[in-house]
């Protein structure tokens, strides 16, 4: 079945150019055209297109407003924004409005065709999963807790966690929150360029009266719609937060959010162990240098002793065939296959970090951004596992499991 496409642009020449680019694609069919956003809304109702190629700057109704209207009224129509504007503000607005992709004009035939197919294929998979009464559907219906973890600092854990959170919001259009559980030196707020008024430190002072509405007031909203629970402003405040606090916070967040991404510190602590115990998936970040592999191997042994290894998905960051230990040798050493790879792209990452803007928003066409989108899809499709709702063990019990002790 051909992909039904509606072209929305106020310039006739642009619409004709796009039709020429797609003319020889046998799996694609232009079902209609629109010269403004309001006409696009009307045509979507009549024609039920699979994909809309939407310009931003148009008369009557602009592309962002039309995207938001169509996303809400006709969610089966996936929208790809086309614009000469490449600034991040436009990217953010398009993402929040519900666009699936953002293409900067001019683009090549290959870029256009590949983007259309990628968006269409993903939408088809999403519809199947939503329609079939399977374990995947059950998983998507339940809140998912995802811990991003490593036993070695400096491996890009927070960069992956922040971009993953934004990627999940973009791919699922569901409610996503990221919790900075690196309580001494967390960088989530810096990476997302948000200024917290209150943090987890102030939150625990109200923990006994905590309800979803009150907890919401402690969260910071990122322009992409992702909510952030920041770490304490001072390292010494970390000692005030316990495993039971973390358990209560996560349990309340589950009442409101579909995906809860947890950025953890590079060591085992009571709060970290509590989060790992409660989460559904542990993304264990590794790089191909010997110290990192050694530390990750030790971390896997600990996770295995805690019966948590079954949740682990190994994510190779800064993947490169030119440097480091061979991936196959690393997998053999760790006894675990790599589930996802994030390529090395220092320039994109450093620029993103210094600006405090996720590269998945500012550089959506790069290989590293595409790898995060794939990681988000892997998380969404991750194996559904029965989750034990029983109360997590206290500090002594957790560390008893860790060091082979018994709790009294």
Image: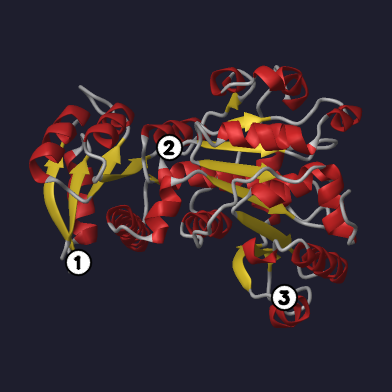
Q: Is residue 390 above or below residue 382?
A: above
Q: Is residue 59 above or below residue 288?
A: above
Q: Residues within 10 Å of mark 1 (few under 14, many from 20)?
A: few
Report how far apart the C-alphas of labels 3 and 1 lie in the structure: 38 Å
Q: Is residue 387 above or below residue 203?
A: below
| Residue at the disc numbered 2 | 95
Report how far apart the C-alphas of labels 2 and 1 lie in the structure: 27 Å
Of badges 3 and 1, the one in the foreground is: 1
| Residue at the disc numbered 1 | 27
Sequence-wise, which precedes: disc 3 or disc 2? 2
Question: Is disc 2 placed on a helix, strand or loop?
Answer: helix
Please tell me which residue is depicted at 65% across the width and 48% down the height of the picture.
278
Please tell me which residue is depicted at 69% across the width and 37% down the height of the picture.
247
Question: Is disc 1 placed on a helix, strand or loop?
Answer: loop
Nearest to the observer: residue 229 or residue 328: 229
Looking at the picture, how far across and down is residue 316, in whole percent? 68, 65
| Residue at the disc numbered 3 | 322
């Amino acid at each position: 079945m051909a992909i039904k496409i509606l072209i929305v642009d106020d310039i006739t020449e642009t619409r004709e150019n796009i039709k020429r680019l797609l003319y020889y694609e046998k799996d694609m069919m232009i079902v209609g055209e629109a010269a403004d956003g309001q006409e696009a809304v009307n045509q979507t109702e009549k024609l039920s297109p699979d994909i809309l190629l939407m310009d931003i700057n148009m008369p009557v109704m602009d592309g962002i407003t039309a995207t938001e209207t169509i996303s809400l009224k006709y969610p089966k129509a996936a929208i790809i924004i086309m614009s000469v504007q490449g600034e991040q503000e436009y990217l953010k607005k398009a993402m929040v409005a519900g666009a699936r992709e953002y293409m900067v004009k001019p683009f090549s035939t290959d870029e256009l065709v590949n983007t259309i197919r990628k968006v269409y294929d993903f939408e088809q998979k999403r519809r199947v999963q939503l329609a079939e009464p399977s374990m995947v559907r059950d998983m998507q219906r339940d809140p998912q807790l995802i811990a991003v973890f490593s036993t070695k600092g400096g491996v890009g854990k927070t960069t992956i966690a922040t971009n993953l959170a934004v990627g999940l919001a973009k791919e699922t259009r569901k409610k996503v929150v990221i919790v900075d559980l690196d309580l001494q030196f967390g960088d989530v707020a810096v990476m997302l360029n948000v200024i917290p008024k209150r943090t987890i430190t102030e939150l625990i002072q109200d923990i006994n009266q905590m309800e979803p509405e009150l907890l919401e007031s402690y969260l910071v909203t990122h322009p992409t719609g992702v909510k952030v629970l920041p770490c304490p402003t001072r390292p010494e405040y970390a000692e005030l937060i316990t495993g039971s606090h973390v358990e209560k916070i996560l349990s309340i967040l589950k009442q409101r959010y579909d995906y809860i991404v947890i950025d953890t510190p590079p060591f085992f602590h009571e709060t970290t162990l509590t989060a790992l115990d409660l989460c559904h998936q542990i993304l264990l970040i590794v790089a191909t240098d010997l110290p990192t592999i050694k530390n990750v191997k030790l971390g896997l042994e600990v996770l295995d002793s805690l019966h948590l290894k079954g949740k682990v998905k190994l994510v190779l960051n800064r993947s490169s065939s030119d440097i480091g230990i061979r991936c196959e040798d690393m997998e053999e050493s760790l006894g675990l296959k790599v589930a996802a790879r994030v390529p090395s792209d220092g320039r994109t990452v450093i620029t993103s970090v210094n600006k405090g803007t996720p590269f998945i928003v500012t550089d959506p066409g790069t290989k590293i951004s595409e790898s995060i989108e794939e990681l988000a899809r892997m998380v969404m499709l991750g194996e559904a596992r029965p989750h034990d709702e029983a109360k997590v063990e206290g500090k002594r019990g957790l560390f008893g499991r860790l060091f082979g002790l018994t709790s009294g």
